[in-house]
């Protein structure tokens, strides 16, 4: 990729995040159209299921200037007729000569959109800034792989680093409020707090009150049946134990309070920790009187968590 294309892909990744929390069960995708001279002439992103995909929105903005140009898209263009026509068809009709793809689509049908673009004489490059695009598409892809929502748990920790349900959730609650727009479901101490517009039932992702009290298999079924791709969790440990104790959490955001510079845990503390076992630190920052820790799961959960290999289609 040249400098114009690199900048365009990062722009496509950035605008794709505006679809977080509203596209499910579809992925949040962004697209930028460059003309034959490398100038940006159109961009677009997917807003919600049933509406135009990112490529179609970007091509609509570009108009005739897309001919002979390059489409830069964060996910492989779709290859089937659903509620909207396939995006690979729109790109062919627009007469672009090159398509850059960050992430390949595990739900792609038949030969795949990329292969049909190649057969139409269009140059296709894939894997372009894939790791960066997965900052947005990662939870969606993980949800497909595990056949359940991707779950992020925000909590305040005690001084020894363990999640503490007795805390007020002050700084954690503040971050939860800032992140809620990026998730399909927000679950707090009182149960489900918010559901994003969905495509079934009464229009929201549903999680009945009291539904998280069963065994691991039942908890997984309940979460899967919401059809949400992502869940933001913040609540009391006891209320969330069916999720937190069975390995269902994929990412943690923990707030560790300030401790003395020379300190020994009290006798009641079993051990000190940063993030739970099975998680790897991916970010450490200081925020006011707390240290903010982000951890991603690296160790497989202790119980089977879904039906790997099942890839629901998107439209």
Image (cartoon, grey):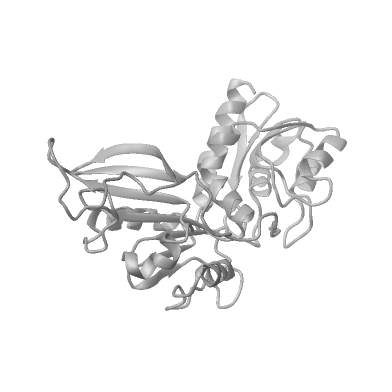
* Picture coordinates of residue 164, whole percent (x, y): 26, 59
- Horizontal relation, residue 70 to residue 92: left or right: left
The residue under the point 48% across, 52% down is 250
* Picture coordinates of residue 26, whole percent (x, y): 62, 57
- Horizontal relation, residue 171 to residue 129: left or right: left
Name the quadrant containing residue 96: top right
**Nearest the eye: 24 or 67:** 24
Q: Quadrant of the N terminus?
A: top right
**Nearest the eye: 4 or 263:** 263
The residue under the point 59% across, 24% down is 4
- Horizontal relation, residue 35 to residue 233: left or right: right
* Picture coordinates of residue 144, whole percent (x, y): 63, 55
Q: Quadrant of the C terminus?
A: bottom right
- Classify 53 as above or below 211: above
Name the quadrant containing residue 34: top right
The residue under the point 44% across, 46% down is 278
Name the quadrant containing residue 200: bottom right
- Horizontal relation, residue 302 to residue 272: left or right: right
* Picture coordinates of residue 248, whole percent (x, y): 49, 58
């Amino acid at each position: 990729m040249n400098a114009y294309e690199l900048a365009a892909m990062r722009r496509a990744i950035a605008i794709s995040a505006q679809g977080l929390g509203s596209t499910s069960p579809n992925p949040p995708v962004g697209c930028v159209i460059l003309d034959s001279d490398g100038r940006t002439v159109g961009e677009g992103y997917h807003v919600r299921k049933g509406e135009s995909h990112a490529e179609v929105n970007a091509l609509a903005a570009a108009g005739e200037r897309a001919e002979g140009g390059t489409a830069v898209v964060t996910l492989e263009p779709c290859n089937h007729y659903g509620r909207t026509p396939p995006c690979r068809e729109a790109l062919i009709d627009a007469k672009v000569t090159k398509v850059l793809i960050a992430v390949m689509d595990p739900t792609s049908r038949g030969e795949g959109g990329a292969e049909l673009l190649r057969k139409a004489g269009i140059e296709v490059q894939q894997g372009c800034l894939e790791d960066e695009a997965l900052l947005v598409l990662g939870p969606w892809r993980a949800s497909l792989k595990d056949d359940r929502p991707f779950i992020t748990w925000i909590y305040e920790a005690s001084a020894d680093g363990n999640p503490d349900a007795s805390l007020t959730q002050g700084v954690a609650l503040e971050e939860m409020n800032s992140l809620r727009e990026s998730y399909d479901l927000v679950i707090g101490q009182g149960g489900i707090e918010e559901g994003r517009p969905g495509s079934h039932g009464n229009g929201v992702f549903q999680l009945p009150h009291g539904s998280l009290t069963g065994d691991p298999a039942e908890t997984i079924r309940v979460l899967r049946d919401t059809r949400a791709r992502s869940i933001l969790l913040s609540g009391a440990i006891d209320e969330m134990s069916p999720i937190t104790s069975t390995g269902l959490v994929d990412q943690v955001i923990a707030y560790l309070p300030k401790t003395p510079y020379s300190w020994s845990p009290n006798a009641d503390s079993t051990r000190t920790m940063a993030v739970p076992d099975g998680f790897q630190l991916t970010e450490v920052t200081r925020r006011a009187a707390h240290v903010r820790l982000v951890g991603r799961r690296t160790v497989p959960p202790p119980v089977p968590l879904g039906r790997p290999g099942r890839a629901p289609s998107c439209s």
